[in-house]
Amino acid sequence: MLKTILNPKQRIFVLSAVLVCVALVLTGFVASKKTLEVLVDGKNIKIETRSTNPKKILQEMGVHLSEHDGYALDTPKVRDGSKIEVIRAIPVTVINQGKRHVVNTGLATVAEVLKLMKVDYANKVVSVKLTDRPRVDLPIHVLGNNEKLNAVEETMEFAVREQADSHLEFGEKRVITPGVLGKKQVLYKETLTADGSVKREKLSEEVLAQPQEQIVAVGKKNMVETSRGSFRYRAVYDMQATAYTPYLDGSGSGITATGIPARRGVVAVDPQVIPLGSQVYIPGYGHAIAADTGGAIRGHKIDLCIDTYQEAISFGRRQVTVYLLDEY
């Protein structure tokens, strides 16, 4: 039988290799696969990786980080279930004791931004929480000795929505659902100026309670909605309508019983039903003036002046609703 005999150097090498493997397993360097969640550009992506370096993981995914982009890891180290968020660089404004600075950064917290800009904020009042995410629309104020923050609770006006009510008299209003004022907390920076006056600047506001709209019924009794707005009417009729044109072949003109030229917007009526000179509204035709009569127009009949002969023929005979409007 062939025996393998290791010399002392070989024994030391083998023993060292075994110890290194054990150490790697115990310390996790022989990394097992981990499932991570990566939030990048509005997308949540789940991946499996053996890497423990967030930047390398992003590179493996093909995620490009510009010079000022950053990332945030929600655990001290990359482990199974960790979440990496890519933070694209944005312009962040820092106002340090009245001096404005803007930096383009993808850092995750206000504190990191202040450190990057070498702003000494120890024992100073900062307008936002140091752990907050920097925002484009919210400057970071580091207050000086003559400045202070003042949070004030203010009310928010409610909107009023009106809805038509055909049972209420025209112009009458009735509250159906009372409105409720909202509440917001407004953060002001107050600066004591050289002349002793206080200058106030609004920094931010937070809605505490949304206002609730007020609903009001508005009287529309005997009102009709038209393309020109709402009009009050004193009577409404169902009538048989025909159409006419003041000329048949494009020549001539028509003069109505009241002496005005016949044209679209002029209708013939029975004066015993609708007095001549009255304003009427006919859905599908529009506003018109009762300015003409006709031998066949008796009772609940009406003749509508149309632009062309062909339109008049196509109109035929049909039932329409006629609103006799109040004077306007």
Image (spheres, helix red, strand yellow):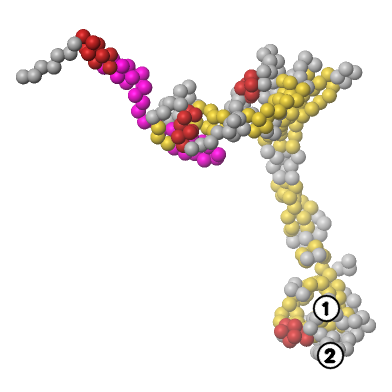
Amino acid of disc 2: Gly
User: Residue 24 magenta-drawn?
Assistant: yes
Q: Nearer the viewer, residue 97 or 212?
A: 97
**Left or right: where 150 falls relative to 135:** right
The boundaries of the magenta stretch are 18-46
Look at 66% across and 30% down and name the residue there: 104
Alpha-carbon neighbours of circle 1 within 10 Å: few (<14), some, or many (≥20)? some
Disc number at residue 264? 1
Locate residue 217, reporting x and y percent.
74, 53
Number of on-image labels: 2
In the image, which disc is placed on residue 295?
2
Q: Residue furthest right?
A: 259
Which residue occupies 45% across, 34% down? 60
Q: Earlier in the sequence, mark 1 or mark 2?
A: 1
Give the residue drawn at x 72%, y 83%.
315
The answer to which of 36 and 165 lies nearer the viewer is 36
> In this view of the protein, can residue 255 be seen by the observer?
yes
Q: Position of residue 180 (x, y in %)?
A: 71, 40
Judged by depth in the image, the label closer to the viewer, 1 or 2, is 1
- Residue at the left extreme, as displayed: 1
The quadrant of the picture occupied by the C terminus is bottom right
Is mark 1 in CB contact (under 8 Å) with mark 2? Answer: no
Q: CA distance from mark 1 to mark 2?
A: 20 Å
Is 272 rendered above or below residue 50?
A: below
